[in-house]
Amino acid sequence: MDPIDTGSNGIILPIGGGWVEKKLRRSVSGRSRGRGLEEQKHIHRLVESILRGDDYKILRTPLLHPTPGAKYIMEEICTRKPLWLSDVESRNLFDTNLVNDTEAELRRFFSTLWRTHRLAAWDFELYVQPDGRVVILDFDKFKTQIDEHFFDYACFPRNFRL
């Protein structure tokens, strides 16, 4: 089975029916390079619960399959159109209203996640979907502290602050 995507922390495999499975990659020491599978699933559930609110029309996350145990199965999404909010060229590929609305919802999401769970979204990815919504994905490096350079990462718009 060919992977849909591979990253430093894992691999995404299609399993059929519109679902994919994330399998973590282990380092030489045998430990995961980011948060463990259960931690990522927990964060995914938190993100899902926040983005279900009426305040979010653009931003969403893939549905997490209610599979018990050690499997991480989620809805398959389109990853052909990444949106890097700090990159002018990436922003210019999309409608200005979509980019601005995504930024506003990301700010609201980030603030809610931090205020209610003391988690800071970091090293996440955004993908524009065929339906015009934007998916936030990748929950392996969410943090519990924010330093002065935290928001300099490519996933954040320039000058992003709480």
Image (cartoon, helix red, strand yellow):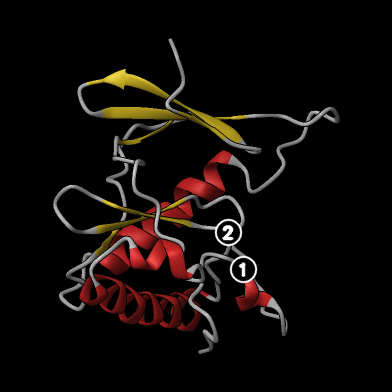
On residue 123, the disc is 2
Mark 2, secondary structure of its residue: loop
Location of residue 31 with respect to 96 vertically, above or below: above
Numbered disc 1: secondary structure = loop
Label 1 crowd bin: few (<14), some (14–19), many (20+), radius 10 Å: some
**Residue drawn 22% across the image and 65% down it:** 52
Q: Residue at x 62, y 56 (%)?
A: 141
Percent x, y for residue 102? 31, 72
Q: Is residue 11 left or right of residue 62?
A: right
- Residue 158 in the image: state x and y as whole percent: 53, 81
Q: Residues within 10 Å of mark 2 (few under 14, many from 20)?
A: some
| Numbered label attached to residue 30 | none
> Which of disc 2 and disc 1 is earlier in sequence?
2
- What residue is rendered at 33% in x and 19% in y? 15
Q: Are marks 1 and 2 in contact (CB under 8 Å)?
A: yes
Under mark 2, the amino acid is: Asp
Across and down, in percent, residue 68 comes to: 38, 32
Q: CA distance from mark 1 to mark 2?
A: 7 Å
16 on left or right of 12? left
Which residue is the extreme one toward the right?
29
Q: Residue furthest bottom?
A: 162
Farthest residue toward the top? 1
Residue under numbered circle 1? 153
Quarter of the image holding residue 58?
bottom left
Q: Amino acid at mark 1?
A: Tyr
Left/right placement of residue 99 relative to residue 158 reads left
Determine the image quadrant of residue 79.
top left
Residue 45 position, x and y percent, is 37, 54
